[in-house]
Image: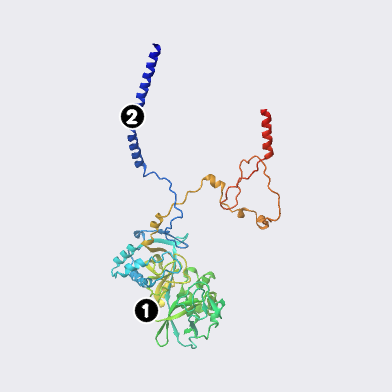
Amino acid sequence: MDHELRKRGTSARCRRRAIAAVCVIVIACSLAPLAATAARKLAASHGASLHLPTRRAIPYPRLEWPLEISGGQYIPAAWNDIAGWSADDHLQAYKAFRTSCKSIAEQRLPPADAKALGTSLREPCRAAKALDLTVGARARAFFEEHFLPLRISRLGEEAGFVTGYYEPVIDGSRTQTDVYNVPIYRRPSNLFVRGFKQDSPSLPNKGQVFRKIGRRKLLPYYDRAEIEDGAIAGRGLEICWLKDQTDLLFAQIQGSARIRLEDGSTVRINYDAHNGYPYMAVGRILIDRGIIPKEQMSMHKIREWMDQNPDGAKELRRQNRSYVFFREVALSDKDEAVGAQGVPLTPGRSIAVDKSLHVYGTPFFIQGELPIESEQSKTPFRRLMVAQDTGSAITGPARADIYYGAGPDAGRVSGRFRHNMHFVILVPKSLDPLARGRKMPIPDPRPSEKIAKLFPQVDPLKDQPKDEKNDAKPADPATPGPKPAVIATEPAKNPAPVVTGKVPLPEARPVIKADQEGRRYRRIHRSRSNT
């Protein structure tokens, strides 16, 4: 009887446990959809703030880098923050820009040397060609619509530097006389520049220049002293003749001149080539010698001193070994000088720039003060200029030579310009540096501090003693040497890593051969102890 009762109680407890288990399963199944829904909502709410690391594709994609100007720095600016921008005569600058666009449109091939702006000016030029503006406000709107302003200067400096140049008018003669006996030479036929044909229409204004003797022999070309002493005289290279060497020097410094002949006609000459020597500013020499104070330096002061000191003028000229050759150009008296871009210059709007950095036709807004009204005046100068010329002394990202016209008045004013000015370069919107910068990938994460300590970026040859560098000789593989013994020692507390290169690898684990005798002894000893 008792056995029967115990059996019934056990079966009842099993039924209750089964019912409880079924209830738990039913409740869990009913709560599962609710938990899934809550998880999805939580993931959706935090999805925007969750940034999981992504593996970067290899090889890395090629992206357009932001604008890069060698040796320069720039910062984007707003049109309203440029002092004097709204008050300028934008129509005159627009006309000068359209003049440059004619030359840009004729270029069928990309430039041989890569520059920051490249061929990006073609798009604004196409827009300018379709517009014939006559109102300054519309010209201003054109520049603001197609360009972005960037304040530019040399790396580490705040301002740029400007000088001035002009086209001198000089008396001369087609024939040599007692009065006119200083020749103006055209480019000699034996003048040779590597990478250019001798009859090339344009040669670089920097770099080495040779005189070719025969087919293969090259020697440095004659310097100023040798040419003045008659090294190339009598070869039929004379375009015309001037009164003195000072007139010729000033024509060479300016790069062009108008030669007024005795019969009233005019010969126009332009820069064609140089002899390969770097330009040495004669004004700088006079300042260094203490002859003319820096604050009084001008082209007028240089000429005045050279006229009063003919012997000293000869020695001063020859300090500048550079010599310029000219070509005769078919221009009338009403035409302005032609710049290196091949277009007529605009007085007060055309500038010469470093052609190794900048593209002809690039607009620059230059702001500052210049002695225009008098030598001591500080006339505000805030103008939009266009790069249309170059010069061997014009180097740097924020360096300009302002063309001021022709004649003695233009020479008197432009000769005073030696001032620091602020530069704003106008770049086409297709080169927006901010837009390109946003696409730049984030650098890979740096290694941990522990890894950096294990593999320091050092140069073992630099840290090696000097005697070891010079006296260390590679081991002769034919000479046998003692093999390194493997000795079991206690590891050092702070072992110094062995560096074998800039990014050293961990030292390979040594290969230790098994001790067969030791193993055999252990096996015999274990077998004896078991017995």
In-image side of 458 versus 77 (left or right):
right
Q: Is residue 197 above or below residue 25?
A: below
What amino acid type should be assigned to the residue bearing mark 2? Ile
**From this viewpoint, is residue 291 visible?**
no
Q: Return the residue at label 2.
A: 27
Residue 509, horizontal then vertical, whole percent: 61, 45
Q: CA distance from mark 2 to mark 1?
A: 99 Å
Residue 157, horizontal then vertical, whole percent: 46, 60
- Residue at left 45%, top 55%? 60
Q: Is residue 186 above or below residue 279?
A: below
Q: Residues within 10 Å of mark 2 (few under 14, many from 20)?
A: few
Q: Nearer the viewer, residue 405 or 512?
A: 512
Question: Colour scheme in the image?
Answer: rainbow
In-image side of 285 versus 1 (left or right):
right
Of badges 2 and 1, nearer the viewer stands: 2
> Considering the numbered disc 2 on the image, is that residue within a helix, a strand or a loop?
helix
> Residue 384: which numbered mark, if any?
none
**From this viewpoint, is residue 330 visible?**
yes
- Residue at left 71%, top 53%? 480
- For the C terminus, the quadrant is top right
> Considering the numbered disc 1 on the image, is that residue within a helix, a strand or a loop?
loop
Sequence-first tag of 2 and 1: 2
Q: Return the residue at label 1.
A: 335
Residue 351, horizontal then vertical, whole percent: 41, 70
Residue 516, horizontal then vertical, whole percent: 67, 40
Q: Residues within 10 Å of mark 1 (few under 14, many from 20)?
A: few
- Residue at left 54%, top 46%? 451
